[in-house]
Image (cartoon, helix red, strand yellow):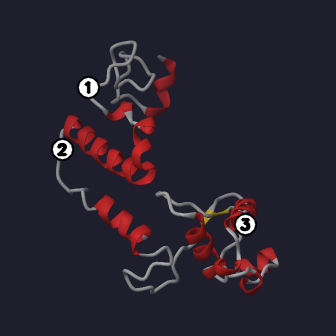
Amino acid sequence: MLEDWTGIRKAQLPPDEQLTDEQILVLFEALKKMLDAYNWMFVLQIQVPQRIQYRALRDNFDQEAICKRWHMGFFELCKPGTPHGECELGEEYCHCAFFAEMFSHFVDEELTHEEERRRHLEIEIRHLKRKYDDDWMNYYPYHLDPNYDDENGNPYDYGFGEDFDEDEEEDDWWRK
């Protein structure tokens, strides 16, 4: 249990109603750093008010967690079996709904390289708009945009150069 690792019981964490915004900021950041030290990451893909994040962390602090020394685990935001729409983050910030909407655009069909790139660009832009709101263009995925042209005139080589052959053995790419 996460409580056993940390020595902190859920009951020791004050409810968010008893804390000021400043107290939540300090406590929440400290808890996230502590979780990182245990390789148990608290990661959100969209912007969520810190008070709501703290509430979700506190409400789920008694979760089952496996101690991982080399690989990371992820903090569960909802208890297993939580009905859809009853997310700890609220309906507006529900991660399950976020990922369901994001993956609803994936289709099992054969796509050309260009069609696949355009689909990835659409999905990435939708994700960035949700995560960064009006600042989403600061994170624009130029590497996916077929209209973007880098300084070498070849936006698709990912630094390998235009002589790179994708069909070559993966281990031999560095010999070119």
User: Type of residue at label 2?
Assistant: Leu
Q: Amino acid at mark 3?
A: Leu
Asked whether residue 5 is in view, the answer is yes
142 vs 16, nearest the viewer: 16
Question: Where, by quadrant of the figure, is residue 29 drawn?
Answer: bottom right
SS type, badge 1: loop
Q: Work out whether mark 3 precedes mark 1 in sequence or the reverse, and give the earlier one.
A: 3
Which of the 4 image quadrants contains residue 111?
Answer: top left
Label 2, on which residue?
111
Residue at the disc numbered 1: 147
User: Could you say where residue 17 lies in the image, as x and y percent from the top left?
Assistant: 64, 80
Q: Is residue 82 left or right of residue 6?
A: left
> Which badge, 2 or 1, is on the more N-terminal residue?
2
Task: Give coordinates of residue 21: x percent, y percent.
Answer: 67, 66
**Dot 3 surroundings within 10 Å: few (below 14), some, or many (20 or more)?**
some
Do tag 3 and tag 2 residues touch (Cβ < 8 Å)?
Answer: no
